[in-house]
Image (cartoon, rainbow, N blue to C red):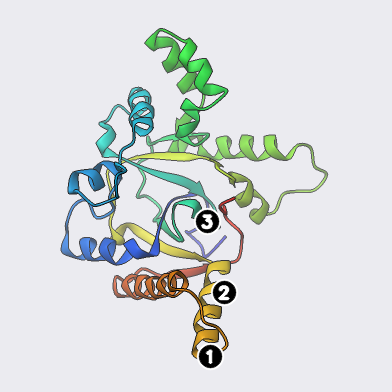
Amino acid sequence: MGSKGREGARAVVNIAAVHIPSFCDRSKSGLQPAYMNAYDVEAAGVARGDRKAVSKTRQRVDDMLRGLHRSRPEDIYFAAVELDGSGISFYGDVCLVLAKGRVHDDTVVLDRNSYDLVQQPLGALIQAQMGTSEIAHTLAGIAGRWRADVAMMGAIKVVGSDGERERRLTTGQISDRLLDDEDYMEVLKVGSFSATDLEAARLALADVATEDHIEREYANGHLAPGHVSLLWAHQRRKAIAALRKAEVPTNLVRSSGRVKR
């Protein structure tokens, strides 16, 4: 679980290595927000082809969530609850871990990915509820608060997915179950963060091993990887260098975290 004072759940955000240098530069320069959500990306006019950063589905979900966090959707930065894994790699190969105390005690936490609100079966239930009060009641049933409820919400999630056992669960097993596929606990953090708010950046063992293999075999003339592989490895090197310059520790994680399927 780590050294004294670092035990327990953390809010984590996964982003692609290619975006880490920009995040570190914005943090150092004091530009706000340093970490950008979809609304920030869209407002900054960052090119994403023909696809808008804030999709119609994202807007629908955010409209429903407003009654829980009572803030503007533009001010919400989504994270996940993690123990000692490498986070949700679907969203990026670098897991940024917010330091203890960087998430307000009253921050809303959902027991699932908020996109479940427009997926079956919960989406159909919400759609059938005509009144705002009924929808609010349904949402309240899947939400809690960071300090008061995360431990119990996590316990219910883990025990519910694992069933009866004769032996205790290990920390690694608990961590894996908290991030089972896309069924993770989502943190609705109000306000962005910078590099100074991080406890560490975690790197998955599989990614580090792949990166090392690509570079070693290519340097020895035994492998001619494609452009995509070389670019990915190059971006990883730049990301790690930027994190070290920003004095953010980088930790290698041996537990699996969540992998894209």
Give the label, 1 or 2, closer to the camera.
1
Q: Residue at 36% x, 59% y: name it.
A: 198
**What separation in Å lies between label 3 and label 1 (alpha carbons)?**
44 Å
**What separation in Å lies between label 3 and label 2 (alpha carbons)?**
27 Å
Amino acid type of the residue that numbered disc 1 sits on in the rendered structure? Gly
Label 1, secondary structure: give it.
loop
Identify residue for label 2: 209
Identify residue for label 1: 221
Amino acid type of the residue that numbered disc 2 sits on in the rendered structure? Ala
Give the label, 3 or 1, closer to the camera.
1
Q: Which residue is outermost to the top?
A: 131
Q: Which mark is residue 7?
A: 3
**What separation in Å lies between label 1 and label 2 (alpha carbons)?**
18 Å
Quarter of the image where one finds residue 20:
bottom left
Q: Residues within 10 Å of mark 1 (few under 14, many from 20)?
A: few
* Image position, residue 72 (x, y; %): 25, 31
* Image position, residue 56 (x, y; %): 34, 31
Q: Is residue 228 above or below residue 162?
A: below
Give the label, 3 or 2, closer to the camera.
2
